[in-house]
Image (cartoon, helix red, strand yellow):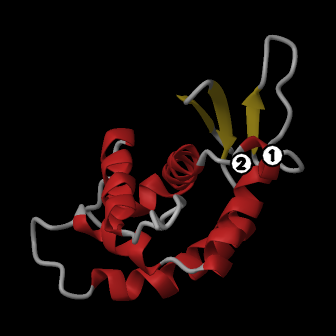
Amino acid sequence: MRESKTTTIGAYEYTVYQLGAIDGRRILTKLAKVAGPAFAGLKPGQANDFFGKLLDALDVELVDALCDKFAEFTEVQLDAEHKPFLKGKFDDHFAGKYGEMLSWLVFCLEVNFSNFFQELGLKVPSKAEIAAKAKDQESDSPKTSTGGSGA
């Protein structure tokens, strides 16, 4: 039986339903191709470093596939009367909210694959850990100037 979990991210409440086994195994196969290198070099006690390495290894195609599939299985509470599925609203809903999108994506992975991660001895990172990782990545990225030349 498929389960669901609900969480609040930013101003919205999200209910994520588990994928069926067929969709789940397809996503798991895609994740495994990225996860293999993320496991490389991990020593006992560093299991939680796996998610940082996994985030660093993600490519556009995998993120697109994950977001597209999980949006089909996520309801978002927009207001007291409206709780549509995220598919079809994704682009506008997460525009400019990439930290929230990343938190949602990790929550979707937790809902669907927490059993798999537990079997490997991995812990899905908390929202605070995700936010810290995103902040670290932002501070590492080059800044572009939008001001004048000062001449």
Residue 130: % across, % down:
37, 50
- Image disc number at residue 73: none
When the figure is inspected, residue 15 is found, relative to residue 74, above or below; the finding is above
Residue 51 spot, x, y in % from top left: 35, 65
Mark 1 and mark 2 in contact? Answer it, CB < 8 Å.
yes
Q: Along the horizontal axis of the image, is 75 left or right of 13? A: right
Where residue 85 sits: x, y (%)?
83, 40
Classify 10 Å Cα crowding around label 2: few (below 14), some (14-19), many (20 and above).
Answer: few
Residue 78 seen anywhere in this rendered image of the structure: yes
Residue 71 in the image: above or below residue 142: above
Residue 95 is marked as 2
Considering every residue shown, the one lying at the far left of the view is: 44
Q: Nearer the viewer, residue 18 or 87?
A: 87
- Quickly name the residue at label 1: 92
- C-alpha separation, residue under disc 1 versus residue under disc 2: 5 Å
Task: Please tell me in which quadrant of the rendered image residue 70 appears.
Answer: bottom right
Q: Is residue 39 above or below residue 46?
A: below
The x, y position of residue 92, in whole percent, is 81, 46
Residue sitting farthest toward the top = 80
Residue at point 39%, 86% (across, down): 36
